Amino acid sequence: MELESTPLELLDPLEVSHWLSAGGPAEKIFDGFEEREGQIDLLQHICTAFNEDKIGVFEAGTGVGKSFAYLIPAILWAVKNKERSVISTGTINLQQQLFEKDIPAVRRLLGIDFKAALMKGRQNYLCLRRLHDSLEETDLFDEEKEDLYTILEWSKTSETGSNSDLSFMPSFSVWQRVNSESDACLGNRCPFYESCFVMKMRKRAAEASILIVNHHLLFADIEMRSAGAGFEDIAVLPPYKRLILDEAHGIESAATSFFSSSVNRFSFTKQLNKLYRIRKTSAAGLLYTLQTLSSAEESLQEAISLIQVIKTRLQDMEEAALSFLAGASSCRLCEATVSRATSFIGAAELLAKEIASLCSSVRNLIDGINEEEQAGQCVWETRHILRRLESAALVCKNFGEWADRSASVFWVEKHSLEKGGFYPVCYETPLDIAPPIYENLFEPIPTVVCTSATLTSSSAKRTGSFVYWLGRTGACFAEKERLLCAEFISPFNYKQNLLLTVASDMPVPNNDGFQQTLEQTIVRLIRSSAGRSLVLFTSYESLQSACTYARTILAKEGIRVLKQGDDDRFRLLETFKKDATSVLFGTDSFWEGVDVPGESLSHVIIVKLPFSVPSDPVFQARCENLDSRGLSSFMDLSIPEAIIHFRQGFGRLIRHCSDFGVVSVLDKRLLIMPYGNLFLNSLPESKRLFDSTETICTSIRRFLDI
């Protein structure tokens, strides 16, 4: 599909809203359809954003029906104007829901022909070449052999090659052997190019009017365009001029994650092993293939020697990095810590230097190959590996220049190894992500629609304000007349259907007795709702301790306690939905994206207010940056960020108009701290009870009729 610069046919907001109005097509097609005032209002605002090239920032409460409100204008615009619309979501799960459920429903409603495509990161797709290479390398004792052959049989009938379509969940190590990777892709040199699942996916995307992606893939595309690809040609995605960001509350986090660079032992060893490895008693790797083609044979031994040196230097850097951490799980390189980082910085710089020497040696080997053979697969793949190694080495080199790179945060984090022990990961993260988001997303794309149930946040000055989100994402840099901000209230009857409780007899979270009291109180609350609870934590350590205690008590009462990490997230949620009395303990990612309508979730228990950990290196640096500019990091970052996260957790309960239940908060700071009202005022009006745990448990049983 090609974009045409012909006069645009604008959308008539009143005409478009007729599709979802009482007496309109939706009422005739969908059973139980009811007109929603907020949905129609949102749809009309989105039409305006398309017509007038605006940045639309729209908070749509749960139940407003935002998916239909943005899909209908996006599809009509794409069909009328031959302009592709890209819809980006925070999770693959929402991508799947849009593509498999919502788009077919809208297609049926509109009765018009259009193409839609789903794009995920290439690591989600099978690489047929890597699969066949892995099968050739297997031997009689390869434990993964059976799974590999199962994937092979599946690949013969799969239309997409996406791991979500597999009938079983292969282990991480198995999928890592066969999934598509950009640095391993041979493009049209690949013998499987014609049947490549990634190429097929890209072909479908190029023909589509509506493209469903996730935020990570979107930023990969944005990065390539900002590096010179522009917005008129294909980059990671085909060209587009209209963008819808669903779950837009997560944009800053997604951009921070994408634009961070990291290195660890696997960054290096994976690439080094492609060049040279010893398997059993024989040596192999691309270096030997290069040697057979090159006149510079002497470079082979030099490169092999350097690889051995690099592995030693890598080990030295790891030991120095772990020493720098001094027992902490993470640490930022800054004025306060640099005195103990000398060995680590020196080891990182030395590693970068040895990598540069290796790359030079391997390039000498390549230079000895005649020009015709340099176009071959082996040379092409080796050059990819060298670029990867040099990118990793650059991060190491930048650690040595941290004081001159004030726009970045340099930090180290400790990770566990499967067989025991730890290894460090070194990160370089942008300090302020707002300017690049504005310059590369909001400024060049004519229409950007941002929507979520949680975009506004209370502050010391205003309640229900978009100021925090606009500032963190860079949308604040746009001209005022280009910004279109609006709130659309949830139609759900929170006043009647939700009871919010806060236990006034809980100790404050920094009290020594908090964890013990917390564990006992959680069990009492779960009993009061006969299970059917989602318990949200801010610390995995606290979750594990509370879960162990709850299981010893509740197992005897027939209440199954599920815990994040016990199984794949999707299967865990499915079990929770099907087992009506079960409870689920989760942290971080379970505060959002959990959609369990009905009685299986009648009680959400929020253990603590979700403030970021003060010692988190990036958060710490961003706080210092705000304070240095005369702002308040607590009121301008900690509070609004926590409020948005808190509202996400609160929103897990009422997912349907008939849902009914309780949200219990065990953090007494809501009642005793001045900022408590900012959190409470950010929630919809409901029944409220701030009292002792005993009174609350009695009231919950009465409210839920147990």
Image: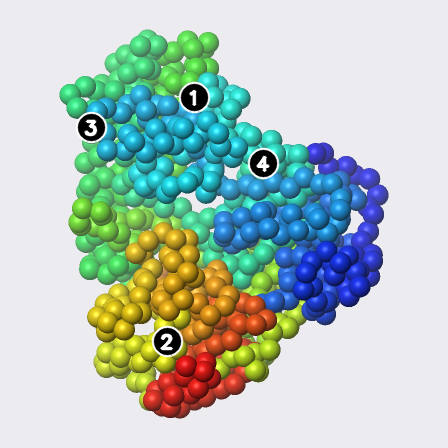
Q: Is residue 203 above or below residue 458?
A: above
Which label is found at residue 121? none
Mark toward the viewer: 2 or 4: 2
Q: Nearer the viewer, residue 508 or 360?
A: 508
Q: Is residue 207 above or below residue 608?
A: above
Mark toward the viewer: 3 or 1: 3
Q: Can residue 373 be seen in this snapshot?
A: yes
Which label is found at residue 235? 4
The residue tagged 2 is: 530
- Distance from Cα at disc 3 to Cα at disc 1: 33 Å
- Distance from Cα at disc 3 to Cα at disc 2: 49 Å
The residue tagged 1 is: 380
Q: Nearer the viewer, residue 283 or 475?
A: 283
For badge 3, the amino acid type reads Phe
Task: State how the image is colored.
Answer: rainbow
- Distance from Cα at disc 1 to Cα at disc 2: 62 Å
- Write the residue at 22% across / 55% down: 324
Question: Which circle's residue, 4 or 1, is located before the other in the chain?
Answer: 4
For badge 2, the amino acid type reads Ala
Question: Which circle's residue, 3 or 4, is located before the other in the chain?
Answer: 3
Question: Which circle's residue, 3 or 1, is located before the other in the chain?
Answer: 3
Please report contact status of discs 4 and 1: CB closer than 8 Å, yes or no: no
Q: Nearer the viewer, residue 208 or 576?
A: 576
Regarding mark 4 in the picture, which secondary structure is present there? loop
The residue tagged 3 is: 141
- Write the residue at 36% across / 67% down: 582
Question: Which circle's residue, 3 or 2, is located before the other in the chain?
Answer: 3
